[in-house]
Image (spheres, rainbow, N blue to C red):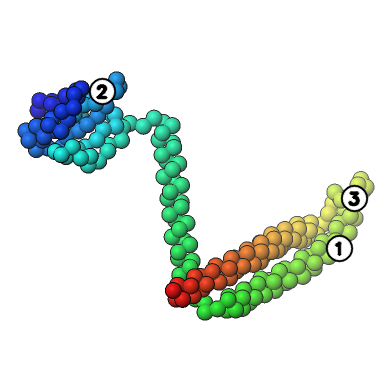
Amino acid sequence: MKNTSITIRIPLVAALLLAISAVHAEKVYKWVDNDGVTHYGDYIPPEYAELQHSVLNEQGVQLEVIEGALTDEQRQQLRLETEIAVNAEKAREANELRDRVLLSTYLSVEEIQDLRDRRIELVQAQIHVTEIYLDNLRSKLEKLEVEAERYSPYNADPKAKPIDEKLARELADTIDSIMLYEKTLTNSQAEQRLLQSKFASDIMRFAELKQLSSEREAR
């Protein structure tokens, strides 16, 4: 098909667009070349295909804008902006879901506080039991270490006998158990803090939603 690309230098754009659309009854394209000259045509020449251009109807009204080729920096910025927008939308949807769950689950702030107290009480009981186990294990380790001091390598005396295999294994197992329970204790304490923070936030938001609901009903 013969290209009808034309450089526009005089105010006859509308007439030209009508002529092009009458002949081809297809889309009309508008683009600006590297010299800043505006062109119109029934297709984009290959050398301008990567430039930003517009699609017009026969009245010269812009229907859409086709973005040109992006630089690496522009692509990176676009990816960043897209990621921010997606994350913002996810956060908005999560907040809306949280509000619906709060309103459908509880009738009052007191209900949330009661559940908070029960959940924290369970975690606190777990913390207490873990602390007891740790105290017992540490006491056991102290006794084992005293006994191990009689043997090499804990005893520097060249005449000291090598540590008994059973005692060595018991020492290692006790140390492993202490490390495991210390990790359990740390996790439980973190869970307790998280619960306190979450419920405090839920109580505040629930109160806000109830207040907004009351204000809407009063209008």
Residue sitting nearer the eye, 120 or 149: 120
Separation (CA) of disc 2 from disc 1: 91 Å
Residue under the image location 24 percent in, 35 percent down: 54
**Amino acid of disc 2:** Val
Q: Which mark is residue 155?
A: 3
Separation (CA) of disc 2 from disc 3: 92 Å
Separation (CA) of disc 3 from disc 1: 15 Å
**Amino acid of disc 3:** Asn
The residue pinned by badge 2 equals 37
Mark toward the start of the polypeptide (2 vs 1): 2
x and y percentages locating residue 211 in the rendered image? 52, 72
Residue sitting nearer the eye, 21 or 59: 59
Q: In which quarter of the image is the N terminus?
A: top left
The residue pinned by badge 1 equals 143
Label 2: state its secondary structure: loop
Decide if residue 91 is on the left or right side of residue 26: right
Label 1: state its secondary structure: helix
Residue under the image location 72 percent in, 58 percent down: 179
Q: Residue 72 carries which label?
A: none
Q: Which of marks 2 and 1 is in front?
A: 2
**Amino acid of disc 1:** Lys
Q: Circle 1: is it few (<14), some (14-19), or many (20+) Cα within 10 Å?
A: few
